[in-house]
Image: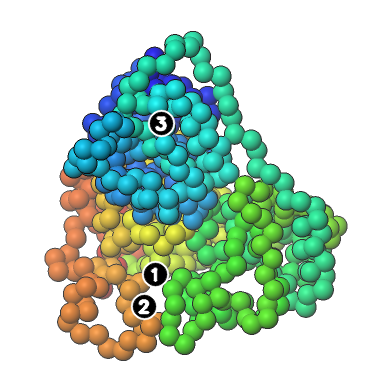
Amino acid sequence: MNGADLACDALLGNGVDTWFANPGTSEMHLVAALDRRPQVRCVLGLFEGVVTGAADGYGRMADRPAATLLHCGPGLANGLANLHNARRARTPVVNIVGDHASYHLPYDAPLTSDIESLARPMSHWVGRAGSAETVRMMVDQACRAAAAPGVATLIMPADAAWGEVPPTSTVPPSLAPARARVASDAIDEAARAMRASRNPLVLLGGTALRTDAMAAAAALSRACPVRLLAEYGSARIERGGGRLAIETMPYPVDAAVTALAQFDLIVCIGATDPVAFFAYPGKPGRLAPPGCRTIELTARGEDPGQAIRALADCFDGRKCDLLAAPALPPMPAAGQLTGSAVAAITALLLPDNAIIARESVTQAAEFAQFAAGGAAHDLLSLTGGAIGMGIPLSIGAAVACPDRKVICLQADGSGMYTCQGLWTQAREQLDVVTVILANRTYAVLHNEMRQVGVGAIGRNARRMLDIDDPALNWVSLAQGMGVEGVRVDTTERFADILRTAIARPGPFLIEADISV
């Protein structure tokens, strides 16, 4: 038995039985060890951003970590953007990065790099297995850190992987502890502040946006005059099917400032004090009004669901029927397809218990509003702002929940960052419908130019913001990676194709041309 065998068994003991991988030479002993463990599911990604984004999607839906397998510092660097999103989503991930054998590092071979420094900004925990004998201890530490939840990066030198260890018949499980409860004193203090407040807001994130927790939030809102909002870019919201139709913080800074202007207290549960995505000339960075007090009731590792239920109990909030769901939108009129029509039709045709992986900041923005009164579904959103998340997120969600339909609402520009994920969808025959909102431009950046005060833009700016010369052919891209695809440009054709795609199993891509 070697260190790689021990690592695989220790991960299995901690409930980690799914690996998303893009390995190289330093990881070959781990590959061989996985080959000896058929109970592990290994999913190959052709780019490391697909690997890390898929691990994010898996962790959000499974509520337990997958492992990644990346090749040295450059492989980690290729996956950092989606590890950033996973860190912001507070997703459990065990991120395993191979390295040169420890005695080879002084030679400064071409792939040598400072992996710890690369990993630290995107990880909640970073460790290195110094030898085969330390592998078990380091894997257990990584799994405990991931369960907090968060991204745990474990660096595995090649000699730690191939080094021999005493054989064992089994590695006993060392499962990570459950999330900590929020202290009753902190709950009581938040309740006192709410009673003294004229206009309190409870801002929800993390597992406070699950069905049982939102039932408690609805009870709280009926027991006392408090407003509820979800943080912008929530990792996962359980919606539709009679669940609480909670509104989300707006993304544009002016709209967000307006939305918070009335409040003198914000209690954050699974969320943090709301701030603008960027600094804009003459606009605030902190979105709450001056003098507004913020209480961050939950720290990482504490249970947001328990916190909202305990807070509702302080006001004698009783479990009650959730608020009446809004009506579904009407079917859009026939004619040229638009982003709004894509959002409405998807909401209308949504199958029960679907998962939506959404990376469409400007197009299909109304989807959450439209779908609130529709079928039960989970909505996964871009958490850290690093684009290229949608397609990988759909992979991880489909692997975690093979009995549920996954629909990926993907902007065309950001989709090109990780389009290799379509190949993984095809290889694994994942039940994913990818809807490409093809507006042939980085529309969000056109909006940002206006937000920072830039007026008319000229040729050079447009050549950096538009992607219509040449136009991308997503159907050809998909077919080249084994996924059937169809291009549509009318509302009636989109509705017909989406119905067909939802009804059949396996991956399918719809290029929704909304460029006119």
Q: Nearer the viewer, residue 307 or 377?
A: 307
The earlier-in-sequence mark between 1 and 2 is: 1
Q: Identify the residue position indicated by label 2 in the image.
A: 447
Residue kind at label 3, given as amino acid type = Gly
The earlier-in-sequence mark between 3 and 1 is: 3
Q: Identify the residue position indicated by label 3 in the image.
A: 130
Residue kind at label 2, given as amino acid type = Asn
For the residues marked 1 and 2, what is the alpha-carbon distance in whole angstroms? 9 Å
Q: Nearer the viewer, residue 423 or 289?
A: 289
Q: Nearer the viewer, residue 139 or 61?
A: 139
Which residue sits furthest front?
106
Mark 2: secondary structure = helix
For the residues marked 3 and 2, what is the alpha-carbon distance in whole angstroms? 49 Å
Disc 3 versus disc 2: nearer the observer: 3
For the residues marked 3 and 1, what is the alpha-carbon distance in whole angstroms? 47 Å
Q: What residue is rendered at 33% in x and 80% in y?
A: 449
Q: Quadrant of residue 336?
A: bottom left
Give the quarter of the figure containing the N terminus. Answer: top left
Q: Identify the residue position indicated by label 1 in the image.
A: 362
- Indicate which disc residue 88 carries: none
Q: Is residue 382 above or below residue 131?
A: below
Residue count near mark 3 (Cα–Cα under 10 Å), binned few <14, some 14–19, many ≥20: some
Q: What residue is rendered at 59% in x and 63% in y?
A: 272
Disc 3 versus disc 1: nearer the observer: 3
Please provide percent x and percent y for residue 482. Answer: 22, 40
Please provide percent x and percent y for residue 331. Answer: 45, 64
Q: Are marks 1 and 2 in contact (CB under 8 Å)?
A: yes
Please provide percent x and percent y for residue 58. Answer: 46, 41
On the rendered structure, is 36 left or right of 478?
right
Mark 3: secondary structure = loop
Please provide percent x and percent y for residue 256. Answer: 54, 76
